[in-house]
Image (cartoon, coloured by chain):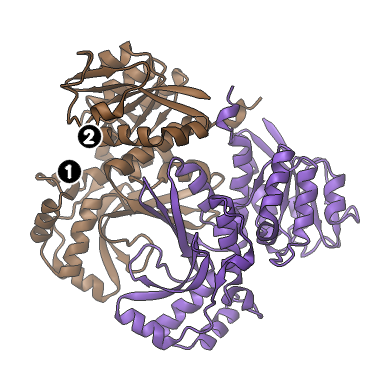
Chain colours: A purple, B brown
């Protein structure tokens, strides 16, 4: 049995999902030979530490750690002080400067700790630097949950499609935009109505600009371009148009011709824009689903779709990354 | 650099694809640290052996090995005699008795050789026995290409969705049936017309019963049930209805209500039958595409689609399996 001491940094919606999933799947992971022990949780109010493993029942009902913290340490200070093997970083994302996640990841990697994250900002801002820091310290940086929600895009390309040359990846990377465009097409309603509906349902934020202006999708394009195509690009290299200008008339006209309009991110084209997609094409999924078509030389086009977000779904992608760290070996390290 | 001596058994359409792909990707695999050396190819006419690696140029133009064989050994005899690390078994499939592939796989596994295959028959007939034989001999049996064509179904479930409980898998597992149903719906033509068209295009066999009666799909249901759900079932446990009774009228009526009719295999229901699927659902792909929805507890429903067959596509799945053998470690074997 391999014991893995895990520190969780960030205790919002995803953080709660991580605690829930690690608890629910503890026994199953032990059967795989992995004892995943959550020894600390840190948020902006402090840290709860327990060397024997955090009792999920004690904290899952708490919105923040204010009432249960056993230490006032926060962020980098907590990461440096706690002897964990692996840090799960799920603080709120900032795509401009990457903080506070960027500092957290740097501290963890520099301290010889693996990092698993769903936080896009630091990867958009500083992917190459973080990657090098991980390599220099002999640890891994895994971020499946940043790019495709529950769609296992990175592992699919790096592992399952190994041997293929990947020509490109195109897809729907934002469930909020997809929901709005789907509802506009179905009900022939203007953008503002569909947006209000999405906000009422909690699918869109009160300030929806991060989603509807294409910022989130462009961040994912940056991550995929850097991680899978070695492109070393930054956010400003992506040509971004959001969905606010899409009209019900355009959707109706497209539909007449057998097309849907979807917000499509494209790597290596580095574009995000409303795009005509044939109805019936595997990437033309509806509702809040995400999708991605992977164009390869040997396997043709492989398409995958799944939920773009969700607390438990994101935590599931994080768990898969954690397991892969302890199951992956480099071929040249066999002997 | 890890040298892997490979013997290929079976030199039909897929076998040619394997030689082609191993040759094209030799350099890329070396970069990964794997020297995949094809040291023998065997078909029903004999065997060509070269310890330094077979020259693909010498054999790719040959339909059989008659003119290039360096030995008269065939099948099991060749497998036993040649000191390879791994056998790729791609002889014609037989879903009733599994031969000759079953004997080939038994010989290879008993001889301590890994087996990678696209041959469904032996797995449908004797999965548990082959699995045990592999374990007893400390080698691996990999068969991604048998179940989903280019769709990475088995690796997706076993590796990427690790931690999830899988409730079920439903999908389109036969490109020939999907092509016929798609054309019937598009053109409002009867089954016999669409079948003729598929035969003219080489998408359906002269005797199409293996595909259109649902036999191929049912074989895949057996493999998925045994490999991913530990069900230990046989072919006769699957309730199978093919597509020969589907009418253009039924397809039109379904379409009116927003549905397509697809031949759907279902695990663990163990059914294969024409099924109503909502148009726009991610599994409702058209043409010769295959698709599969994987229902999970944490990640929700993940859907994947890709080409169901093809020489190079199948060889690509085989290559991915070969690499995974040398990259996978069991967690409990870390220490």
Given residues B231 and B298, the one toward you in this image is B298
Q: Quadrant of residue B144?
A: top left
Q: Are marks 1 and 2 on the same chain?
A: yes
Q: Residue A184 vs residue B178: left or right?
A: right
Q: Residue A162 vs residue A206: left or right?
A: left
Given residues B228 and A196, the one toward you in this image is A196
The C terminus of chain B lies in quadrant: top right
Q: Are marks 1 and 2 in contact (CB under 8 Å)?
A: yes
Q: Is residue A150 above or below residue A25?
A: below
Residue at mark 2: B95
Given residues B117 and B247, the one toward you in this image is B117
Query: Earlier along the polypeptide chain: callout 1 or callout 2?
Result: 2
Q: Is residue A237 above or below residue A6?
A: below
Residue at mark 1: B210
- Position in image of residue A301 (x %, y %): 37, 54
- Position in image of residue A61 (x %, y %): 75, 61
Q: Is residue B161 above or below residue A246?
A: above
Extreme-top residue of the structure: B81
For the residues marked 1 and 2, what is the alpha-carbon distance in whole angstroms? 10 Å
Q: Is residue B13 above or below residue B172?
A: above
| Secondary structure of the residue carrying numbered label 2 | loop
Q: Chain of mark 2?
A: B
Q: Chain of mark 1?
A: B
């Amino acid at each position: 049995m391999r014991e893995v001491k895990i520190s969780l940094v960030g205790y919002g919606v995803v953080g709660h999902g991580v605690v829930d999933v690690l608890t629910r799947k503890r026994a199953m992971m032990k059967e795989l030979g992995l004892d995943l022990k959550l020894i600390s949780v840190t948020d902006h109010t402090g840290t709860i530490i327990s060397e024997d493993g955090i009792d999920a029942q004690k904290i899952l009902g708490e919105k923040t750690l204010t009432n249960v913290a056993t230490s006032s340490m926060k962020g980098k200070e907590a990461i440096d002080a706690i002897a964990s093997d692996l840090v799960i970083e799920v603080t709120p994302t900032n795509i401009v400067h990457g903080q506070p996640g960027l500092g957290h990841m740097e501290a963890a990697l520099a301290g010889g700790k693996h990092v698993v994250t769903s936080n896009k900002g630091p990867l958009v801002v500083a992917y190459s630097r973080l990657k090098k820091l991980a390599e220099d310290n002999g640890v891994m940086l895994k971020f499946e949950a940043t790019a495709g929600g529950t769609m296992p895009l990175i592992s699919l390309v790096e592992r399952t499609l190994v041997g293929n040359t990947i020509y490109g990846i195109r897809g729907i990377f934002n469930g909020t935009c997809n929901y709005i465009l789907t509802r506009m097409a179905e009900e022939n309603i203007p953008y503002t109505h569909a947006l209000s509906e999405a906000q009422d349902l909690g699918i869109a934020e009160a300030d929806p600009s991060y989603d509807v202006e294409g910022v989130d999708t462009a961040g994912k394009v940056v991550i995929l371009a850097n991680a899978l195509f070695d492109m070393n690009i930054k956010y400003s290299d992506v040509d971004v148009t959001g969905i606010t200008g899409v009209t019900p008339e355009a959707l109706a006209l497209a539909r007449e011709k057998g097309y849907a309009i979807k917000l499509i991110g494209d790597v290596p084209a580095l574009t995000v824009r409303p795009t005509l997609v044939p109805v019936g094409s595997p990437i033309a999924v509806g509702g809040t689903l995400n999708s991605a078509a992977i164009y390869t030389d040997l396997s043709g086009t492989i398409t995958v779709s799944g939920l773009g977000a969700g607390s438990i779904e994101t935590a599931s992608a994080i768990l898969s990354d954690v397991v892969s760290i302890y199951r992956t070996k480099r071929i040249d390290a066999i002997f």
